[in-house]
């Protein structure tokens, strides 16, 4: 007969925080393409990629069009933000309403999808404690938006969490989002083979 070794554990009531984990991606809270309202040739690019801009800053001008008499010859920032991408350079021919630059807000968010079951848990709990792990770093975040309509392809409900102050992340970075919900009280026994 085989003898098994056992150990005695005192059963105590303890609390356990229910945590939901998801995979999400970093993006800017708002991304806007900038364009000219007329066709022309780019005369001057007045900003650099990564540069901060304010609403009304001139990003690019068209040849012999960028004057006070013809404001259509200017590509202008429509919000405060960062020049995320310059699509055209001096000398390029551009068509009206075709993007020549991309501006994004400095505020970054992480987007991910949740099931209907998890959506009910999140709504029932109210305001979960949110954290995001990006490249091995834990970043605090806050729940910003939950869609009430599921995505047509995945059938998941889209969720957006805003990253709190911290180091700017590359757009597209993949991370793990943790939503800590209410505490569950019970007796937890360690199970091992």
Image (cartoon, rainbow, N blue to C red):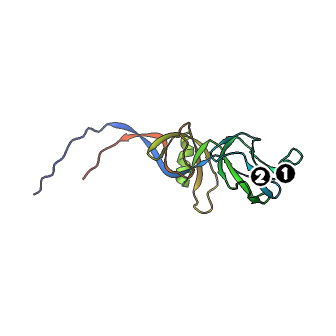
| Residue 170 in view here | yes
Identify the element where label 2 is drawn.
Answer: strand
Residue 117 pos. (x, y %): 53, 53
Q: Give the camera-side residue of 53 and 142.
A: 53
Query: How many labels were placed on the picture?
Result: 2
Q: Give the camera-side residue of 18 and 109.
A: 109
Residue 180 pos. (x, y %): 48, 42
How far is mark 2 from mark 1, CA to CA? Answer: 9 Å
Residue 92: image tag:
none
Residue 155 pos. (x, y %): 58, 60
Identify the element where label 1 is drawn.
Answer: loop
Point 46% across, 41% down: residue:
138
The residue carrying pointer 1 sits among few (fewer than 14), some (14 to 19) or many (20 or more) residues within 10 Å by Cα, namely some
Point 62% across, 57% down: residue:
150
Q: Quick check: marks 2 and 1 in contact, CB under 8 Å?
A: yes
Residue 152 pos. (x, y %): 63, 62
Residue 65: image tag:
1
Residue at the right extreme of this rendering: 69
Q: Which residue is mark 2?
A: 43
- In which quadrant of the rendered image does the N terminus lie? bottom left
| Residue 31 in view here | no
Q: Is residue 32 above or below residue 54?
A: below
Q: Is residue 11 above or below residue 4?
A: above
Q: Earlier in the sequence, mark 2 or mark 1?
A: 2
Point 63% across, 51% down: residue:
147
The residue carrying pointer 2 sits among few (fewer than 14), some (14 to 19) or many (20 or more) residues within 10 Å by Cα, namely some
């Amino acid at each position: 007969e085989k003898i098994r070794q056992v150990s005695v554990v005192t059963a105590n009531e303890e609390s356990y925080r229910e945590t939901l984990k998801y995979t999400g991606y970093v993006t800017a809270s708002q991304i806007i393409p900038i364009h000219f309202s007329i066709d022309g040739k780019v005369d001057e690019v007045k900003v650099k990629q990564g540069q901060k801009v304010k609403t009304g800053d001139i990003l690019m001008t068209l040849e012999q069009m960028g004057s006070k008499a013809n404001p259509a010859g200017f590509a202008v920032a429509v919000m405060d933000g960062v020049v995320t991408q310059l699509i055209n350079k001096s000398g390029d021919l551009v068509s009206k309403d075709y993007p020549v630059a991309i501006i994004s807000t400095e505020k970054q968010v992480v987007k991910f999808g949740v099931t209907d079951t998890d959506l009910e848990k999140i709504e029932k709990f109210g305001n979960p404690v949110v954290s995001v792990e990006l490249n091995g770093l834990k970043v605090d975040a806050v729940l910003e938006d939950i869609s009430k309509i599921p995505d047509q392809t995945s059938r998941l409900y889209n969720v957006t969490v805003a990253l709190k102050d911290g180091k700017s992340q590359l757009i597209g970075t993949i991370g793990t989002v943790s939503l800590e919900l209410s505490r569950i009280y019970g007796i937890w026994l360690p199970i091992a083979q």
